[in-house]
Image (tube, rainbow, N blue to C red):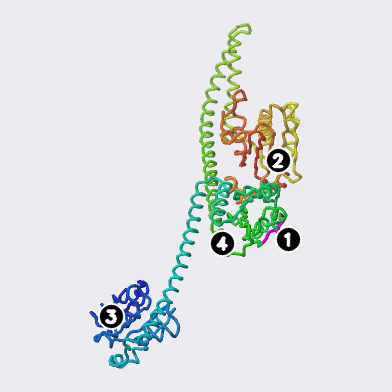
Amino acid sequence: MKILIIDDSTFERRILKSIIEKDGHEVIDAIDGQDGFEKAKFYMPDLVISDILMPNVDGFQFLINMKKDKNLKSIPVVVYSSVYEGDEDRELALKLGAESYIAKPEIPEEIWKSVKTLIDKIETKKEFAESGLVENDERFLKSYSQIVATRLEEKVKILNKEIATHKRLNEEFYLLQSIALAISATQNLHDALIITLKKICNFTGWVYGEAWMLNSDGTLLVRNHRFYCNRDNFEIFTEQSRRVTFPPGVGLPGRTWSTKQPVWVRDVTVDPNYLRAPIAREAGLKTGIAFPVIAGNEVVAVIVFYHEKVEEKNERLIKLIFSVLSQIGSFIKRKQAERETEKLRNQLYHAQKLASVGKLAGGVAHNFNNLLMVVMGYASLLQTELKEDDPLREYAQKIISSSQTATNLAHDLLTFSRKQPINPQPVNMNGIIKDAESILSKLIRENIKMNTMLTDKDCIVMADSDQMKRILMNLTTNARDDMPEGGSLTISTDVIEIDDTFIKAHGYGEVGKYVLISFSDTGIGMDEDTRLKIFDPFFKEIGRGTGLGLAIVYGLVKQHNGYIDVDSTPGKGTTFKIYLPLIESEAED
């Protein structure tokens, strides 16, 4: 059977055509009533399926044209429409000559089923010729005009609504895109929050926005930034809010923090859980809504917006702003990953550099020692051949003394390169520190106070006692030099456990229990560039030692299978942390 489909929707024509062709029929399609009428005359189809509301010539006019044409009036026409509903539409379509009227919404498969049922009931085309149009009937023409006008008006309303929706979606997409681009150019969470507050307030028309961030220890929310339109009455609210903090679950920001979900307060001035109700009332603020900024399943900030009017809960607005803030969460996660990668890269580079320098230093020191033995040997032989009153004897002695100093320097290089032999035994670090206190107190000045805070736990490690004391002496000397105006030095011990989280955060370590020895001073501290070079051999400030003190400490710690790290801030002192593997206390016996 040859079937003509008339519809201005390309999508619906394509779907209906594929279904009919699958059933073994030939399909011709047309884009409106005019196109359909021309193709009907040319192809002479066995059946026509036509939509009604179409540009140029609609379905009603197409029916009139078909039934007026003597060659086409016997062709059955099935009308379907998603716009025209009700008895008036159906009645007009049938009286204009349609054999059937199918109302949508209806899926294409169901339309074809309805058409097939109609085809099965039809025996001959002659039956169609007998039902035709009542020509020149003014009543039908009037009805036709009223229906078309009404439905066109409805269609215009639908189109206007769709245009408004499309415009809103475009604006929301632009907001998301512009915030994403702006955030990508920022360097930290604070800057990202400033941009977000301003853009969302300007887009939504909400008059006040504020951002809350966690304090340094993560126990309270403190006001980080605010944005508001130019109103004098907001100054008091801004100033007093700056002094307020919120723990989890308290106030609007605190509730959002604890639930990790947006919280909408219809009127903050009468809400019993809103702590700033009096100043909000004075500022003229009404509805408040708070959103969490989540990164890695943790709330890192809370953003709050206010309106001057009482606003009912708007799920669309909540969803939009939540989508915007998810970009900040993604931004933070990405920045954290970048910082972590950079940190691990620097740590790896530093460890590789120290290992390379250590290998070189060990080789040089070994050969240097051999040469010094020759120099010292010949100087000793020369000294024995000279008489006691010979002036050259003093020169020979200076050669021997300088060679001995060079030998000690070579030993220090071997220690840094971890090639100096040690004698490890189970020892208690608390005992070693107590024994060394009298020596360490002589290394510092009177204006420096030394404190020891030793744990009650067993701090048994496999170590060389003499080398452990050497570590303590070198760190004490370094702390003394770091406090030219005096201060305090604290030596403490503890037993900790290194786990995967610690390793990921610090970039070193193996899982297990360790004795932690901390050296903290209140000295001048150091910047990040100096901190990264502190263990390099011969890195020193002008006029301060040989530059091998901390390099020796590093080498000895690594030789004892431990780890050493340093935290420092200019003007706030330095803390060295040494981690040595803990062994069972029974091993000491």
Precedes in sequence: disc 4 or disc 3 = 3
Counting from the top left corner in percent of width and height, residue 533 is at 56, 34
The stretch in magenta equals 267-275
**Most prominent secondary structure in the magenta stretch?**
loop
The three-letter code of the residue at mark 2 reads: Val
What residue is disc 1 on? Answer: 272
Q: Residue at x 46, y 70 (%)?
A: 157
Counting from the top left corner in percent of width and height, residue 418 is at 57, 35
What residue is disc 3 on? Answer: 26
Q: Quadrant of residue 206?
A: bottom right
Mark 1 touching mark 3, by CB under 8 A?
no
- Against 529, is 166 above or below? below
Q: Residue at x 68, y 56 (%)?
A: 254
What residue is disc 4 on? Answer: 317
Is 549 inside the magenta-drawn segment?
no
Task: Estimate the spatial distance between the alpha carbons at disc 1 and disc 2, rounded to whole Å.
Answer: 62 Å
What residue is disc 2 on? Answer: 427
The three-letter code of the residue at mark 4 reads: Leu
Task: Estimate the spatial distance between the alpha carbons at disc 4 and disc 3, rounded to whole Å.
Answer: 50 Å
